[in-house]
């Protein structure tokens, strides 16, 4: 598989095309220091076979902001050094920190915007990115990534909605590019030209008046010209359309653009691949080979392979899929796809992030802060496959099945007559309701019990269900 | 060109693949009756060569809602009959009214939502759609179109955000489909099975928790099964993300989903074609040949031709492009593309709609309520082509040029080194500023003066501009 071919990223050799993009874990404390649980999370990814691990966003500035990592002072370096060392010791993965600056948000719903920053503030941000990149190198990371996606400072400058009227905005693309350009120059100067600096940014903003790929391809070109080691594309996740919950700080993944950044189960798979394809083609046409990564519901191994095999991106960023199962790379490589603890995009992890609670996967055993061990070596789950039953009522199909002893959770599979077949949900209870069916169609379901580590029991019987079009009322 | 091949739509023969989709004109009065200006608008489209003209949304219910057409009572039929007759007399176009039900909105920002409707209310809506379809037939229209797109009642039921818990919602696709299904059955029963009933609906909602093509293809299938004459795809335009301006009723095109419904100049051309392609392929795979139309920045003749030639849609819906120049079809057919008054997607028409003012194109002569006559027969515009001058400052290119006697407006053309070349703006003043350029690149500009009817003068000189990357500050 192309997915397991190595890739050279500005001199950083990654063993395959699988990236863990930055995902907040909330496993550290308010002091911003690396904890044992933080390290355990990233070591787990390294053992699982990921090629490039991007450690969750760490603040380049002095800030109080709940349990988020920081790289804003030399006092944070020892913990980060230990993290980098432990990841390196655990596998072949390369590891880089995502470095971030963000503006202030208040529980009232107020938030600081880029037009409130003085030139001295901006100069300080540039300096802080440079210092953070230097600390990343000092800590033994293989590179660093500038967080210029979603709702954060660099992205807000880059946005088409940047309201500044001076040379850091001014309703020009050049003005909007200025801060990221300065931050990149500062990082490269302070950390050294040979230290790979990647950039994550939005291929499309998905907000009112936001930019689209028409501009992100130009942004990509500029970043490539500046020597960005790689470009990691995301989308959306903006404050502009975030939904304010009274008494809570704005969560930038709570609006439509948040749907795009962390797409739930109702959104199409690989929904942003076209952005990477367009940007990669544009870069190539202009003589640049900067590796491009793409995120967005790519945890299906066939989808991931197709993206790299067809050259739409150089590597794939799989966040929730690797959270659910850090062994995803090794299992795919060994052809054990059926053992993967498959993300069903329920977005409990997203809700935990929004609540500033430790981010875990709901498929893990109750109370676990880390993914369970791969249980490849354990005996198969014994499930006296019971009778899966289905009833149809009011336009939905209700399924129930007997509990299986030792099951960690159950996978529900559906096949329809349109050619779609596969996992449709994963859950810990032994019943499920499907409200997404179309009347007049047949659907086939089966269920598999699974151990927490993903080992599947025998499939249940398959039920074949015809969903009638509801009878019409006499009126009208 | 495939664009000029006829199409059979459930027995309705349209002479080409060009549709004028429903566009509010605000040319009628509060009484909802057809006016002379209303008729003139549609006659103009017929003379210009459009194949199918969808008359702006007319209310099926008794409602006070500003200058909008109504079809809620037999008293409206004579005016509508005159409209249909005059359109038929003016060309080969078929003409159908878009029939709409909408809920209440208040200046406070309050709006009625579908969960506030009783079963009796819903039954009445079903009945009103049936009666309206019967009146459409009585008035001599060739068919009717159910408005199930954007922010209106049928669309709100169809939405993934439909909050009802009964059989007209219930968080099931079937529940959400129920009202459109009943309205369609009512319309077909009352107007006759041989009276073509098309449906406009969203291929994607583009709001938080909204549906995507994963569901819209199922909706399309159901509508095809029910005998919809055609499916006209739009996108977005929802109340859920509309921006409330104090003292104004919510305008459903004011949020991000409104950007998608009426995409401005910064959004890509043909941005929703992929939705049509996917839905059309899905229908075909399931044995349906229901014609599919697609909207969204398709006024470039090559783009429009490509969409139908490649079979991504059966016909194209061009709203703003045909508002700007109702003679677009005839001019394209005659190979007079350069004479088209090209829409530059400035969206002044959208702002006029939002303000409930008569919707005109800003490229028309000052004060005109209708597009100027095609001036093909008039002598060429004499423009003593002056010197186009360009200056570069702070990341933007400023252009100015001498006024041309008799010019209605000026087209500005830009070519870059990325292979993009074409109209970039159209305006009545003789200066323009480009903030979309990338530093480090060359751009070439020229300007053409045009008569109001689109006749172009000689091109100006071409200026070749290098945009430097702004010099960096010493700090950082």
Image: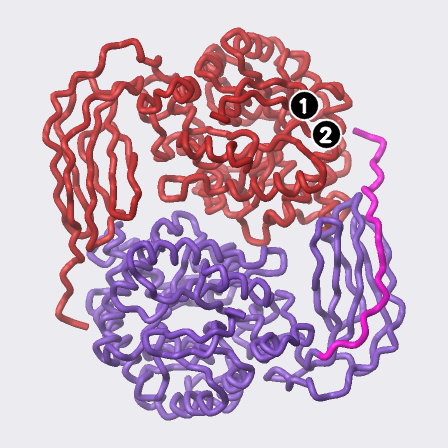
Chain colours: A red, B purple
Same subunit: marks 2 and 1: yes
Q: In which image quadrant can residue B390 be found?
A: bottom right
- Counting from the top left corner in percent of width and height, residue B438 is at 75, 47
Callout 1: few (<14), some (14-19), or many (20+) C-alpha neighbours within 10 Å? some
- Depth check: A291 or B106 in front? A291
- Among numbered discs 2 and 1, the one appearing first in the sequence: 1
- Counting from the top left corner in percent of width and height, residue B456 is at 75, 76
- Tell me which chain the residue with mark 2 is part of: A
The residue shown at (55%, 10%) is A88
Q: Is residue B298 above or below residue A412?
A: below
Locate residue A334 relative to residue A216 in the image: left or right. Answer: left
Magenta includes B224? no
- Residues in magenta? B455-476
Q: Secondary structure at mark 2?
A: loop
- Depth check: A21 or A171 in front? A21
* Quarter of the C terminus of chain B within the rendering: top right
Report, in whole angstroms, how far the alpha carbon at label 2 lies from the one at label 1: 9 Å
The residue shown at (61%, 8%) is A78
Tell me the residue that label 1 is attached to: A10
- Tell me which chain the residue with mark 1 is part of: A
Locate residue A296 relative to residue A179 in the image: left or right. Answer: left
| In contact (CB < 8 Å): disc 2 and disc 1 | yes
Callout 2: few (<14), some (14-19), or many (20+) C-alpha neighbours within 10 Å? some
Q: Is residue A36 above or below residue B30?
A: above
The residue shown at (62%, 56%) is B266
């Amino acid at each position: 598989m192309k997915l397991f071919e190595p890739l050279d990223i500005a001199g950083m050799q990654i063993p395959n095309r699988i990236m863990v993009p930055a995902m907040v874990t909330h496993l550290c404390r308010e002091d911003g220091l690396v904890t044992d649980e933080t390290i355990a999370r990233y070591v787990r990814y390294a053992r699982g076979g990921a090629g490039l691990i991007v450690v969750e966003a760490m603040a380049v500035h002095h800030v109080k902001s709940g349990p988020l990592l920081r790289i804003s002072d030399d006092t944070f370096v020892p913990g980060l050094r230990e993290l980098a060392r432990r990841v390196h010791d655990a596998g072949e993965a390369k590891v880089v920190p995502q470095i971030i600056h963000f503006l202030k948000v208040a529980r009232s719903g107020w938030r600081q915007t880029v037009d409130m920053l003085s030139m001295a503030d901006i100069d300080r941000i540039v300096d802080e990115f440079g210092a953070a990149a230097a600390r990343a190198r000092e800590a033994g990371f293989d590179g660093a990534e500038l967080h210029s996606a979603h709702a954060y400072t660099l992205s807000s400058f880059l946005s088409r909605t940047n309201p500044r009227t001076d040379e850091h905005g001014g309703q020009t693309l050049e003005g909007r590019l200025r801060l990221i350009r300065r931050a990149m120059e500062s990082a490269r100067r302070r950390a050294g030209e040979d230290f790979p600096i990647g950039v994550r940014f939005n291929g499309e903003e998905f907000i009112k008046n936001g930019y689209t790929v028409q501009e992100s391809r130009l942004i990509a070109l500029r970043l490539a010209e500046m020597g960005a080691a790689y470009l990691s594309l995301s989308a959306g996740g903006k404050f502009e359309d975030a939904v304010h919950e009274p008494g809570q700080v704005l969560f930038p993944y709570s609006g439509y653009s948040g749907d795009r950044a962390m797409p739930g189960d109702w959104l199409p798979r690989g929904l942003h691949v076209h952005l990477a394809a367009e940007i990669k083609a544009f870069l190539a046409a202009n003589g640049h080979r900067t590796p491009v990564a793409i995120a967005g519901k790519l945890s299906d191994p066939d989808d991931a392979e197709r993206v790299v095999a067809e050259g739409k991106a150089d590597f794939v960023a799989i966040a929730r899929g690797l959270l659910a199962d850090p062994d995803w790379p090794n299992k795919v490589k060994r052809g054990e796809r059926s053992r993967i603890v498959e993300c069903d995009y329920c977005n409990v992890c997203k809700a935990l992030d929004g609540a500033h609670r430790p981010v875990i996967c709901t498929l893990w055993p109750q109370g676990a802060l880390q993914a369970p061990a791969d249980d490849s070596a354990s005996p198969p789950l014994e499930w006296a496959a019971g009778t899966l039953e289905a009833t149809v009522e009011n336009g939905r199909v209700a399924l129930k099945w007997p509990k299986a002893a030792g099951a960690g959770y159950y996978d529900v599979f559906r096949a329809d007559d349109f050619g779609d077949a596969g996992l449709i949900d994963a859950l810990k209870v032994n019943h499920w309701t499907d409200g997404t069916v179309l009347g007049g169609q047949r659907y086939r379901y089966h269920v598999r019990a699974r151990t927490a580590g993903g080992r599947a029991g025998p499939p249940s019987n398959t039920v074949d269900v015809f969903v009638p079009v509801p009878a019409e009322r006499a009126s009208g």
